[in-house]
Amino acid sequence: MADVRVRLRGGPQDGHEVTVSADSSGKPIPRITIPVRTRNSQAVPPLLAYERRSRLPDGAWEFRYVGTEA
């Protein structure tokens, strides 16, 4: 599997770019989660959830913020 560029939209990570795995058709996985940074190292951080939307003109994929998971 190849990797593809993903641009995050909305939520705390708005505007950041990450690299994710693509399936055999070249599309990125449909949903990603990113742990929130916390000051308390013993706390279990919530996960920011982003879902695949569309391919952008520059070739990157757009993922939209859909909320948090515990």
Image (cartoon, grey):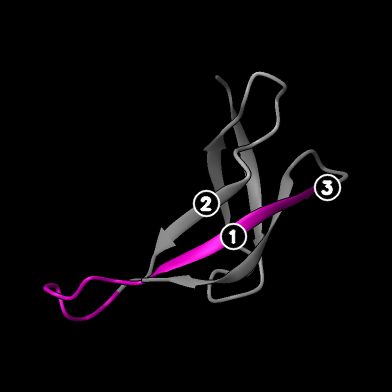
When the figure is inspected, residue 21 is found, relative to residue 39, above or below; the finding is above
In the rendered image, residue 45 lying in the magenta stretch gets the answer: yes
Name the residue nearer the viewer: 32 or 6.
32
Residue beneath the point at 62% across and 69% down: 66
Q: Secondary structure at mark 3?
A: loop
Pick the quarter of the image with the C terminus.
bottom left
| 54 left or right of 32 in image | right
> What kind of residue is marked 3?
Leu
* Residue 48 pos. (x, y %): 48, 67
Tell whether label 1 touches label 2 (CB within 8 Å): yes
When the figure is inspected, residue 2 is found, relative to residue 46, above or below; the finding is above
* Residue 35 pos. (x, y %): 37, 63
First in residue order: circle 2 vs circle 3:
2
Residue beneath the point at 63% across and 44% down: 30
Q: Which residues are magenta?
A: 38-55
Q: Which residue is situated farthest in the right direction here?
A: 57
Measure the C-alpha gap from mark 2 to mark 3.
Answer: 18 Å
Measure the C-alpha gap from mark 2 to mark 1.
Answer: 5 Å
Residue beneath the point at 53% across and 76% down: 12
First in residue order: circle 3 vs circle 1:
1
| 31 left or right of 52 in image | left
* Residue 31 pos. (x, y %): 58, 50
- Identify the residue position indicated by label 2 in the image: 32
> What kind of residue is marked 1?
Tyr
- Identify the residue position indicated by label 3 in the image: 56
- The quadrant in which residue 25 appears is top right
- The quadrant in which residue 20 appears is top right
Q: Secondary structure at mark 1?
A: strand
The circle on residue 50 is 1
Q: Nearer the viewer, mark 2 or mark 3?
A: 2
Q: Which residue is situated farthest in the front direction here?
A: 70
Q: Residues within 10 Å of mark 1 (few under 14, many from 20)?
A: many
